[in-house]
Amino acid sequence: MAEVSFPKDLKGSLEKGTWIGDGVHGYLIGQVWQGQAYVLNVWTYRQTSAEILVTEKDSCLHHLSGADRIIGVVFVTKSEDIDGAETAIVSLPLEVQTAVSGPLFVVCGIKNVLKQAEASFYCYFKDGNQLERLREHPEFTLFGSEFVTFQIKAQLSLNLQLDKDTSSKSERWGEKLNKVFRNLEGEASSGCYVYGVQGTDIFLSENDVIGTKEKIETVKDFYAFITSKQDSDTRHKKIMKTDKRPVMVDLYQQMSGTTGRFAKPTCAPAIQEKFGRCSSLVLTLPLDVVVDAKDSEPLTTLMERFSTAIIAQLRAMKTCVDLHRCKENEFHIPEPFHFSIPQRHTCITVVYPRKVPDEMLEKRRCFLHDKMCLGQDQPVFRRANARLFQGQLAAGGYIINPHIGLSPSAVQGGKTHLVQGNYAYHHYMQDHFDDDKWGCAYRSLQTIISWFRLQGYSDKPVPSHKEIQQALVTVGDKEASFVGSKKWIGSFEVSFVLDHLLGVTSKFISVSAGSELASKGRELAQHFDTQGTPIMIGGGVLAHTILGVDYSKVSGEIKFLILDPHYTGGEDLAIIQKEGWCGWKGINFWNATAHYNLCMPQRPVCF
């Protein structure tokens, strides 16, 4: 029996959906690899017709990275079986059938009987025309180390001109824009683009690797080569890590050669001179494409993924420009953002109009939540939610998620419960400000506020020490003389500031001795599973940030993932992890006789 893996929230979300009528109501997004299907996401719709199926297919593809693709459909039926799925698949428009490449067609069959929906996964083999039940693995384990992420960036200029005496100018501008975008798509599909790897002299063309004589056939070979040291003996021994940084790629246009822009002149060069009045418009498109490629893929396939992903983003940009036109010749710049959906293990790209605030894009976000069967209880597609890639720093140069890459805690039979999402590491002596020996709780609070910013709950800047002190004066907790002082704050002051600045409430755990924290494993695990926010813990004269716990329900053993704000060095992740400024700590880390208060911020309900 073939197998399917999927995020544990996905099946439940589909079963809770509102389905009207029978038939194909959506697409399954993911990968089929080594005989196993990996369903990463969905794209659903209410109505079913041939035209809608094609339109929704295009809309879905515009949001996918270069690796994810449509691997099947969501089929809804009111009967006790899904026999009608075979007929529905065969009846799909040809454009949709060809979008699902390979012999495997995954079907999520939803039996919507008496308003009780039940979802199951099936495999349809195109050659044998038969439907087979798939063995399900809802505890999703993503294949991470076998993929390499490429990020292609470029500034593409669009130059438009329109004669002054042209009638229906608004329509004519639209025609000009359509033509320019079609030309860009043609260039991307023609093979005239060359891809240069940043930090190297290596270029990738449609059929060759330029800049080396080494034999490089697969993505794995290529990644090992560009990340290797000078010693060629160790070049191919480099281990592929799960926390690889993306390979940054620049886009160039080949002007000569067999695939160059001017490779096949049709006539002798000529100059045409024309006099008259015209309007001109220049738009610069900030192309930003993410492609996740299997390390076993040949480089020729990688080039196809690059061009496919670029074309998809160009079409998404064109749609954004059309939807958000200001006036007849004024357009918003379309700007792509990449989002990692919680628990879905996939990258979604959304193009937003630049300078249009998030508040005015609520309908667009609601549309995306609905399409992907996401709840509306937390932000996913706000600009602040944009994916931060490994090694990327937050604004201000702060390290993001320094716990990534740490070794396991080694709790026997334990289960890890971690902070959800991104945060920035704030510690002593940052921002050209000396708070050594008194500012640890301030820094822990800054880390917590950075979490709410990076999850899209707030766009307010991370406050300085003085701004934190002023907030405490404003709410009546401190006297005016507190502002500008070097006085400590504790867990309760942290909660006051969160409430005042962000409207965030907090729960508390208090223990009379550090040794009692060993009995709080269940409560802390539940917090990270349901809220996922960093915890500020204060005791004695010290404050720390708890990022997670590894807890065994059987033995009661627990370890704490600690982010230490007392670090005074530079933003060196290797030192921070090696010296334990971010790392797993046992119960002996806490003062056995000190009283501790834990401030546990609660997520607001919004999207």
Image (cartoon, grey):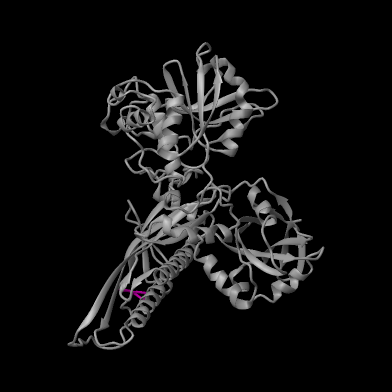
Please state the extent of the stretch shown in magenta in the rendering: 256-260
Confirm whether residue 566 shows in the render: no
Quadrant of the frame with the N terminus: bottom right
On the image, the x and y values in percent for residue 498 come to 44, 34
On the image, the x and y values in percent for residue 66 come to 49, 61
| Residue 188 picture quarter | bottom left
On the image, the x and y values in percent for residue 304 come to 48, 66
Above or below 496: residue 51: below
Above or below 512: residue 186: below
| Residue 451 picture quarter | top left
Confirm whether residue 420 shows in the render: yes
Q: Magenta span: helix, strand or loop, mainly?
A: loop
Above or below 196: residue 389: above
Above or below 404: residue 585: above
Frontmost residue, 430 versus 307: 430
Frontmost residue, 334 versus 28: 334
User: Magenta stretch containing residue 259, yes or no?
Assistant: yes
Drawn side of residue 598 relative to residue 251, left or right = right
Q: Residue at x 30, y 28 (%)?
A: 429
On the image, the x and y values in percent for residue 202 come to 35, 57
Number of on-image labels: 0
Frontmost residue, 251 versus 89: 89
Q: Return the residue found at the far top.
A: 593
| Residue 471 picture quarter | top left
User: Magenta stretch containing residue 436, yes or no?
Assistant: no
